[in-house]
Amino acid sequence: GLGWGHMPYPAVADDITAGRLVVIEPEGTPTGKNMPMSAIYRSDAPPGRAGRWMIDRLKSIIAGPCSKAD
């Protein structure tokens, strides 16, 4: 499989230094604070209660008001 994540650098610095993790910077990454997100799952194996909660939570956060830093 393939996966990626966003972690605070101090939490993964040792793993990056040891080569267990690699920093990636995809081309065309949005420069603002908001990024489009998608939840993808197999139709024959939909998310359970926890997965559904996470998807609904992300939707509510994304739909909420955005504040810009000065």
Image: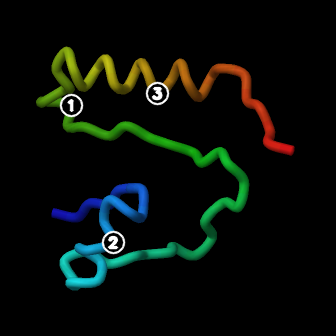
Pointer 3: what residue? 58
Of pointers 3 and 2, the one earlier in the residue sequence: 2
Q: Quadrant of residue 27?
A: bottom right
Of pointers 3 and 1, the one earlier in the residue sequence: 1
Q: Which residue is drawn at 43% across and 75% down?
A: 24
Pointer 2: what residue? 13
Q: What element carries label 3?
A: helix
Q: Considering depth in this image, is 17 or 27 the residue closer to the camera?
A: 17
Amino acid type assigned to the residue bearing label 3 in the image: Leu
Q: Please give left or right for residue 24 compared with residue 16 in the image.
A: right
Quadrant in which the N terminus appears: bottom left
The mark lying in front, picked from 2 and 1, is 2
Residue 2: x percent and y percent?
23, 64
Amino acid type assigned to the residue bearing label 1 in the image: Ser
Q: Is the residue 9 above or below the residue 64 in the image?
A: below
Density class for disc 2 (Cα within 10 Å; few <14, some 14-19, many ≥20) is: few
Q: Please give left or right for residue 34 compared with residue 61 in the image.
A: right
Residue 67: x percent and y percent?
77, 31
